[in-house]
Amino acid sequence: MNSNSYFNAFILVFLAGLCWSFGVVTVRYMADAQSYVFQYLFYRGLSIAIILIIYLFIKEGFSFYKNFFRIGISGILGGIFLATAFTGFIFSITMTTAAVTLFMLASMPFIAAIVGYFILGEIIRRSTIIAMIIAFIGVCVMIYNDTISGSALGAIIGFISATGFALYSVTIRWKPETPKFTTVVLAG
């Protein structure tokens, strides 16, 4: 990857993270957010799907719809896992603090590494294993005193969300030829 492509990718990832971070603020400042979870998920998913379809149309023209016929089992599974992640994230953020939800999501790379090891045969370095153990202990310490009715349930759902994101990333690595944007449209 040349330096110009790397810089462009860096900017896109940075902007994506910035845009995604507004989801937490939006949900946390909703009055009685638990009452609007399904509506929020519906309109959020619809927005994601419409924006990506417009992008695909601009990029590929009228032939963008052919990607939907090429997704295969990895695209379908990826869409299901990503939809699970989206849904779990919103439910978690309404049931616990943003910090607990985001700490659960921080476990996503570690979950992806473990699943990638077992499913794809990817190698996990010793330093990665040590970091995974330390992160797991840290997450356990943070949620240890929470009650099951509130924050701990939100943490569990946050972990399910992180697992959904991790499984999505493994499915797109499993079959790299799967159209990624189309998979996200399915999840939306």
Image: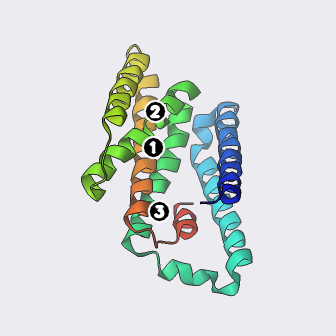
Element assignment for label 2: helix
Point out the image quarter for the C terminus.
bottom right
In this orientation, does residue 170 appear? Answer: yes
> As drawn, is 133 to the left or to the right of 25?
left
* Residue 93, picture quadrant: top right
Determine whether label 3 and label 2 are within 8 Å by CB: no
The amino acid on which the numbered mark 1 sits, given as a three-letter code, is Ser
Element assignment for label 3: helix
Determine whether label 1 and label 2 are within 8 Å by CB: yes
Name the spot of residue 39 as percent of width and height, x first: 62, 50
According to the picture, the residue beneath numbered tag 1 turns out to be 161
Point out the image quarter for the N terminus.
bottom right
Q: Earlier in the sequence, mark 1 or mark 3?
A: 3
**Mark 1 → mark 2, Cα distance in angstroms:** 8 Å
According to the picture, the residue beneath numbered tag 2 turns out to be 104
- Residue farthest to the front, as pictured: 2
Residue neighbourhood size for the residue with mark 1, other residues' Cα within 10 Å, grouped as few (<14), some (14–19), many (≥20): many
